[in-house]
Amino acid sequence: MDIFNGLTLIGGLSLFLFGMNIMGQALERRAGGKLRALLGKFTTGRAAGLLTGLIVTAVIQSSSATTVMVVGFVNSGLMTLRQAVNVIMGANVGTTVTAWILSLAGIDSGSWYIRLLKPSSFTPLLALAGIILYLFCRGEKKKDTGMIFLGFATLMFGMETMSGAVSGLGEVPAFRSLFVMFENPLLGVLAGAALTAVIQSSSASVGILQALAVTGQVSYGAAIPIIMGQNIGTCATAMLSSVGANKNARRAAMVHLSFNCIGTAVWIAVFSIARGVFHLQFLQEPASLLGIAAAHSVFNILCLVLILPWSGALEKLVTKLVPDERQKEEYMELDERFFAAPSIALERCRRVTESMAKLSVESLKEAIRALEKLTPELSEAIRVKEEKTDYYEDVLSTYLVKLSALQISASDSRAAAKLLKIIGDFERVSDHAVNLLKAAEEMAEKERKFTDTAHRELKVLCGAVEEVLELSLRAFLEQDLKAAATVEPLEQVIDRLKEEMRTRHILRMQKGGCSVTAGFVWSDLLTDLERTADHCSNIAGCMLEMAQQDLNLHEHLREFRNGSEEFREKFRYFRKKYALDGE
């Protein structure tokens, strides 16, 4: 083997890892809502947890990615530690699917039909189909399917390149000695763990082992300990992801490590004893690609069979290894670990936005009550809610911007854009609540009062604003498009009310019925209430816009206002409902 073979090996390895990565990402995007539906079944029992972990890992081709997601779920409170134990166990079995797919490269037969099963026979066709779907089709699902085909073709081409580059190593004495050394079980386990920890994928490290197996110098005696060690190395990703997380998330990562360490320790001991007592001859035979895939699956299934009956004890063990902390822990629902599954990350964003929305609407309603009767408790509650909504906006915006920068599907990108718009509007509603509070405080401090007529008019406007708040909140929380369509005509009525009330107040001031100071406060109140309705209109319009997958919000609203009989009918209804005295 010369330097050129070494360069070819590096190129093949790079293509192999790149292909596996883009295929996994495309598979995750393509799964979309189905993956989210599976996650909803976590609480249905042990068997469901095992099956979910197995299926999700088989889909995204990485037990490390699945475990990192599980750590994120536990950290956010979406999943309990007991549920996480079952999912992690299932993930370890699911990761063996990749090795079976790669083992197809080892098929050797003169039969034309059997040769069709070799990846080298059908991957060119997959690559062709993939490039056609990716370049010439418009639908995002078709493009993702194309990326899956291209990723698979790339990783198989990379594996064949690696195999070709190392084929000459079979005649190199040093290489033969290296794998004889790995027949020492301890050294084999350490080598497998180190390789997998570096590339952070047991599927990839098994693929590399399969590529080296074509030299004929990798015996089963060396391959089996390396495979066992790979299960320990794959824990590195989950352990790193648990840094900075709460205690239950760290326990979930520790479950992954403990499960693999205990399974490896027990079965490597059994392997060593059996090898010494029975002198198993097949261990000296060269390992095949199919044999490595089988060994990988058998080992992981044996670990599952060994530890599954003791899953409760495993949970207690990690609870002792990561003890409770004295102080109460607080966790953020938004965790960057969810970036491994963008659809889940978006769902968490929506849940946090729902909390923000409720808080924002509550603060505005309390501010309206403060206009009638101001109390220190009400003032404090409004300001606390406004600070919380500011914090929500900052955290959500940062999280969504980071999420949008990832390779996510077009539908997820639209959903992220929608949430970014909506959280800005809800934050502004809470700002207007504080402005109303300041107006109430100014009136109390200067001992000013509005006239009885002004109070009656203000009560009408506040009633309309409270209704538009309820409609926009319901439109967002319940995806109620009927409520969303009702917001716009009511917002138009509020605009007219504002102008009518401003004109009436000017007339009262001219007649001496109201002070100039109260007039300034009145003008500010009307502006804040009217702008609150504007933000409600933005929220409702955004919901209607997303339902039509149309990002031109203002165009949509203009057409609704100008051409809809439904709009005119609702406008007349609200105009009558919130009519001022004398109209």
Image (spheres, rainbow, N blue to C red):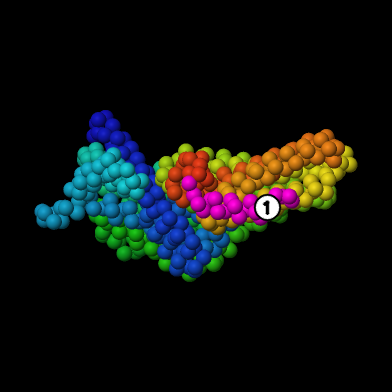
The residue sitting at the front extreme is 582
Q: Position of residue 508 (x, y in %)?
A: 80, 40
Is residue 75 something that shows in the picture? no
Q: Is residue 151 or residue 460 the one in the foreground?
A: 460
Q: Between residue 343 and residue 379, name the one nearer to us.
A: 379
* x and y, in percent, of residue 264 in the image: 43, 57
Disc 1 on helix, strand or loop? Answer: loop
Residue at screen point 38% across, 63% down? 301
Is residue 299 shown in magenta?
no
Residue 358 % position (x, y): 65, 53
Q: Which residue is mark 1?
A: 578
Which quadrant of the structure image shows residue 134?
top left
Is 578 in the magenta? yes
Residue visible at 53% across and 56% down?
482
Residue depicted at 54% across the width and 67% down the height? 312
Magenta span dominant secondary structure: helix
Q: Residue at x 83, y 38 (%)?
A: 511
- Give the extent of the magenta segment: 563-583
Looking at the picture, tell me which residue is in the foreground, 312 or 427: 427
Residue furthest toward the right? 447
Q: Residues within 10 Å of mark 1 (few under 14, many from 20)?
A: some
Residue that lies at the very extreme toward the top in this rendered image: 3
Q: Is residue 66 above or below residue 408?
A: below
